[in-house]
């Protein structure tokens, strides 16, 4: 293998300072046989061999040119311990001194500043989603030890610490140990570029605390949250690049397509609504006051958060025939720490629409009658809302979930209780959309009524429309009959 000497034979050269040497030999670029970094450059300083590998031959030749110029053009001595030219050693020392004077931003402080910057313009659910994604990654961005707090406590500590209202406050007693560890043992943001740390980051995005894979939607939500944070870090100069952009997106399963097994038919829906009315004592009316709530999901295709925010002033209940619900706001549930009001329910405009826009939804006579009965028996809740709890407040998600779970035990045969059939109140909306599609309502009109795009309706419900398989079979059979007997 050919080499080049730093100094031609007989050329005078002064003595190098201690730890450095002018005795340098530079070898030509060679191939290693490795797939990831197949090009290698080797050089010798005072008898010690050094090497580096590269992904392309051009990068290897460029590095060889840098070392050659340091050897012959600038006449630099090389450090024996590192094998680097004196100028590069000095640059590294200056960078280290600068880092000590202005230490790199650490993970917790970065998360706190980033969330504070997005807080005012984000909905409560968006804030909670950001916190969940960053909290999952935090387990990779904190140095661990035998005395480290439990993973769950570290995640809760970050979720508490990044809420702007909690800045400067003492953490809750049960989180203090984890919070102190988090703020002292978190890594600099730039450590995200390290191979070992980044591999752990990817693992935390994909798995739950118990080591089982996270749901596909959970992974996507966490990855989106981290990606936007890292893009901000690049803009702020904390990272030279977003490492997520180097990684191909993981192909995961998704709950995007509706499962036919969750859909109730008309008889099952009536049985469920009837069973709801029997939940709880008669005087407290726990179930009866929610019959109409589930009915607007099944007959009008509302989301639960839209039903929670529905007001009587937005309900046109005709004496005969069809009525109309005009949806104007949604009340998604979040933790109190994520809302500006300090309430569990955020107050937002309709999903995927301008804040001031509304969505009129025609409702059939059967739902008009149910709402009239509800108004006569329970009147109006606070703020003129249609649905309220026993004190007139906002109906909590835990309330309508518990009532629904109890009603399923009354309405369904024992062998169907543990099945996916109508397992969630939201499944009533799926049943409504599927019923409209099977009735022949155009996809565009279904999408308008339920507040989705036609593309989403087609993708999510295509497999739930009856008759497609039979139509396809008839077309195939007709084509086969047209070919005749090939013998």
Image (cartoon, grey):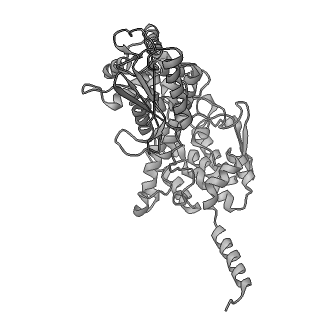
**Quadrant (top left, top right, bottom left, bottom right) of the C terminus:** bottom right
Q: Could you tell me residue 452's position as x and y percent?
A: 67, 45
On the image, the x and y values in percent for residue 419 come to 44, 58
User: Looking at this rendering, what residue extends furthest in the front direction?
Assistant: 10
User: Is any part of residue 393 visible from this angle?
Assistant: no
Please indicate whether residue 226 sits to the left or right of residue 158 in the image.
right
Find the residue positioned furthest to the bottom: 487
Q: Residue at x 73, y 30 (%)?
A: 356
Q: Is residue 392 left or right of residue 92?
A: right
Query: Observer-nearest residue: 12 or 53?
Result: 12
Residue 484, image quadrant:
bottom right
- At x 72%, y 84%, the residue is 483
Q: Is residue 304 above or below residue 415?
A: above
- Relative side of 430 to 409, left or right: right
The answer to whether one can see residue 203 in this image is yes
- Quadrant (top left/top right/bottom left/bottom right) for the N terminus: top left
């Amino acid at each position: 293998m050919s080499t080049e000497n730093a100094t031609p034979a007989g050329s005078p050269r002064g003595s190098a300072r201690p730890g450095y040497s002018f005795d340098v030999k530079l070898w030509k670029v060679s191939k290693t046989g490795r797939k990831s970094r197949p090009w290698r450059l080797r050089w010798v300083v005072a008898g010690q061999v050094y090497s580096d590998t590269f992904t392309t031959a051009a990068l290897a030749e460029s590095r060889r040119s840098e070392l050659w110029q340091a050897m012959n053009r600038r006449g630099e001595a090389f450090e024996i311990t590192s094998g680097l030219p004196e100028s590069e050693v000095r640059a590294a020392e200056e960078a280290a001194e600068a880092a000590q004077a202005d230490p790199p931003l650490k993970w917790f402080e970065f998360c706190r500043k980033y969330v504070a910057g997005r807080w005012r313009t984000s909905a409560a659910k968006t804030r909670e989603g950001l916190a969940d994604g960053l909290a999952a990654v935090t387990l990779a961005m904190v140095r661990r030890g035998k005395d480290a707090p439990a993973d769950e406590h570290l995640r809760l500590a970050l979720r508490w610490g990044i809420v702007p209202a909690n800045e400067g406050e003492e953490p809750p007693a049960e989180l203090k140990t984890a919070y102190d560890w988090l703020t002292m043992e978190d890594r600099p943001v730039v450590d995200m570029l390290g191979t070992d740390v980044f591999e752990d980051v990817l693992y935390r995005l994909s798995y739950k605390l118990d080591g089982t894979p996270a749901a596909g939607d959970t992974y996507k939500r966490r990855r989106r949250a981290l990606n936007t944070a890292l893009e901000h870090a690049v803009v702020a100069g904390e990272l030279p690049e977003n490492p997520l952009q180097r990684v191909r997106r993981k192909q995961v399963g998704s709950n995007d397509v509706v499962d036919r097994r969750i859909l109730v038919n008309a008889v099952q829906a009536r049985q469920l609504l009837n069973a709801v009315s029997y939940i709880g004592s008669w005087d407290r009316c726990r179930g009866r006051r929610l019959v109409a709530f589930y009915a607007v999901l099944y007959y009008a295709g509302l989301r639960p958060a839209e039903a929670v925010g529905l007001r009587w002033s937005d309900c046109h209940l005709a004496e005969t025939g069809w009525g109309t619900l005009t949806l104007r706001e949604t009340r998604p549930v979040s933790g109190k720490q994520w809302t500006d009001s300090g309430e569990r329910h955020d107050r937002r405009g309709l999903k995927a629409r301008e804040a001031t826009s509304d969505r009129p939804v025609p409702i059939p006579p059967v739902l008009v009658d149910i709402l009239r009965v509800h108004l006569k028996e329970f009147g109006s809740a606070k703020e003129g809302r249609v649905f309220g709890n026993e004190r007139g407040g906002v109906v909590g998600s835990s309330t309508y979930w518990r009532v629904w779970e109890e009603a399923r035990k009354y309405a369904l045969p024992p062998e169907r209780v543990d099945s996916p059939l109508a397992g969630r109140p939201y499944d009533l909306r799926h049943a409504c959309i599927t019923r409209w599609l099977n009735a022949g309502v155009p996809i565009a009109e279904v999408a308008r009524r339920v507040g989705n795009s036609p593309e989403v309706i087609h993708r999510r419900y295509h497999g739930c429309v009856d008759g497609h398989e039979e139509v396809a079979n008839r077309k195939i059979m007709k084509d086969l009959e047209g070919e005749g007997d090939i013998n």
